Amino acid sequence: MLFSLPELVQWLGFATFEMFAHLLALLAFSVLLALRADGLAPGLSWWDVFVPFFAADGLTAYFTTIVSVRLFQDGEKRLAVLRFFWVLTLLSLKFVFEMLLCQKLAEETRELWFGLILSPVFILLQLLMIRACRVN
């Protein structure tokens, strides 16, 4: 079962542009990951591989700030604040997951275990599940 674009916009709370930015980041990440795995780019670190995700997160945060300010100016104060905090919560959980995973792959810290690394993803999935139940 595939979701339609309006369903994804409603459940995730992201605009179409933001989802497109994250899809492009996923495509660039996949290419960089394949280059790193095959050894075709020897100077490529794990931090360089994750740069598309970090850039998409920054672009989404910037776009969300602009949209929230516009909504606030148009008198939609409640919607602006809710959208701003919802997207910032999702982005911060995604960013923490990416940072922890990147630190683990770069072997900067050995104390990180995968349960700790995946805990932001578990929280994110629970929040999305609650939102999906509230939307319908």
Image (tube, helix red, strand yellow):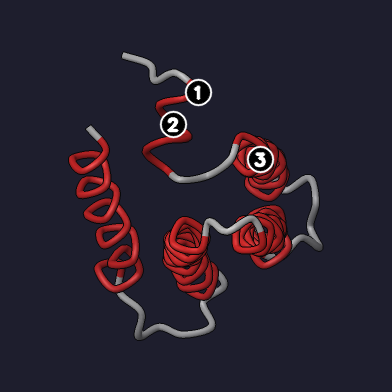
Amino acid type for the residue under numbered disc 2 = Leu
Label ID, residue 8: 2
- Chain-order first, disc 3 or disc 2: 2
Residue at 47% x, 61% y is 94
Residue 13 location (% of width, % of height):
45, 45
Query: Residue 135 at x, y = what percent?
Result: 27, 38
Label 1 vs label 3: CA separation? 29 Å
Write down the quadrant of residue 97 in the picture: bottom left
Name the side, left or right, on which 29 lies relative to 134: right
Where 22 sits versus 45, above or below? above
How far apart are the alpha carbons under marks 2 and 1? 5 Å
Relative to residue 133, is residue 49 depicted above or below? below
Q: Dot 3 corresponds to which residue?
A: 34
User: Circle 2 sits in a helix, a strand or a loop, which is it?
Assistant: helix
Residue 88 vs residue 111, the one in the foreground: 88
Tally the numbered discs.
Answer: 3
Q: Disc number at residue 75?
A: none
Mark 1 or 3, closer to the camera? 1
Residue nearer the viewer, 131 or 22: 131
Determine the residue located farthest toward the top in the rendered image: 1
Quadrant (top left/top right/bottom left/bottom right) for the N terminus: top left
Residue 58: x %, y % from top left: 69, 63
Query: Residue 5: which numbered mark, if any?
Result: 1
